Amino acid sequence: MRTAFKTSAKIQAVNLVRACGIVLLLCAFDANAQTTINVSTAAQLQSAVQTANGAGGNRVISVADGTYTLSDTLYINAPNISIIGASSNRANVIIQGTGMSASASVGTLVRVAASGFQLRYVTLQKSKYHLVQITGENNADSPSLRDCILRDAYEQMVKVSINPSDKSVTSDNGLVENCLFEYTAGIGPQYYIGGIDAHGAKNWVVRRNTFRNIASPSNSVAEFAVHFWNTSANNTVERNTIINCDRGIGFGLQGMGNTGGVIRNNMLYHAANNHAFADSAIALAESPNTRVYNNTVYNENSFPWAIEYRFGSTTGVDISNNLVNRQIIARDGASGTATNNVTNAVANWFTAPASGNLHLTSAITSVVDKGKTISGLTDDFDGEARPAGAGIDIGADEFGAATATPKPNPPTDVRAN
Ligand SMILES: [Ca+2]
Ligand SMILES: [Ca+2]
Ligand SMILES: [Ca+2]
């Protein structure tokens, strides 16, 4: 009996191990086969998007290193589809159209009409229209664009759209993080360009991105590096670096305003260069109850002001603790609070202005510990805790702050020119 029992137990144990193994294999098989599609050619990428749509979404398209020249827009029509560079190196996965011009055959590279889209670790470049369009009119919520390079679009790089005749349906809860937006030629191809151009966007976060050379060559000023308008509300733009863009961060436009939101801890620099249409670093227009605090602006061009708030419907704004070297002005009847700003910054206060590095070089007396306490202000450009020392510093950098918060992974391939 004893021997038989032992044998039986051994067989049961072996069978159990086999069964578990099969279950584990099935689980692994399911995870790979049902959620991830690996691609290494443009045709495979375009096919994978169709497959993901046809399956009802919930697919990761993993893109091998290489250059992918599209023959048509990638239409994302089902929820929770991700396009992710397999190597996690955004410079090595280039998805592009056929050119940056009005006559190019591919208009927008990626058009998103469903929620939960994710783009990560890729470069998008060369479009006739936009690199990415998030269609708010299709209620495409919660998109995320992270760790990408977005460059050389003939129109705005990222567009968030809305149906003008039904503004109740909008794109909400988007995230744009740690991306580089730029024109590699040092200037744009025309004036109808911008970085993020968002209509009707609500509760979006744009943080830790770099925007460079979004500047018009002719006719009129370029659109902003970051613009939330046309019924947008409650968006946060923080910890970005904006270099040599005609206009930096805008909330609202005359007749197409914005509500609330926060612009904080950003660094903006513009050289005395050949950009003929350089304009405001930060602008509010018909944007009530917006808070603009602890930004640093250093401009070497001749444009007379750094921050403007404009029009009678712009009420209740708080513009405080900003460190700039140009005026902060209320225009056309705008009203609100503007306190604890320093408007006479000089170059040697900053580490490396020409590369947009506006960290303080020393404990400037009029700046350090001279800010006011602001609800929600807990860190600085670097993610370091505020206040350090006796009080909040003015500007984006809290000088001498301990690096208590681990810094996020900085992009490694950003040129500092
Ligand atoms: Ca929505
Ligand atoms: Ca301090
Ligand atoms: Ca700091």
Image: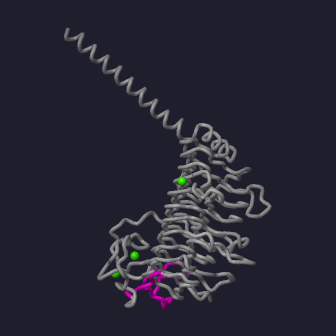
In the image, taking residue 44 as reference, residue 60 lies left or right, namely left
Looking at the picture, tell me which residue is in the foreground, 197 or 32: 197
* Magenta stretch bounds: 336-363
- Magenta span contains residue 212: no
Residue shown at 63% from the left, 42% from the top: 48
Give residue 37's quadrant in the image.
top right
Relative to residue 204, is residue 115 depicted above or below?
Answer: above
In this orientation, which residue lies closer to the viewer: 82 or 308? 308
Q: Residue furthest top?
A: 1
Percent x, y for residue 123? Answer: 61, 59
Q: Nearer the viewer, residue 139 or 167?
A: 167
Residue 117 visible in the shown view: yes
- Which residue is pictured at 19% across the width and 11% down the height? 2
x, y (%) of residue 319? 46, 80
Q: Position of residue 178 (x, y in %)?
A: 51, 63
**Left or right: 328 as drawn, with respect to 377:** right
Question: In the current view of this chain or complex, which residue is farthest to the right?
Answer: 103
Compared to residue 79, the image places residue 15 above or below, namely above
Q: Quadrant of residue 127?
A: bottom right
**Image point (47%, 82%), residue name:** 351
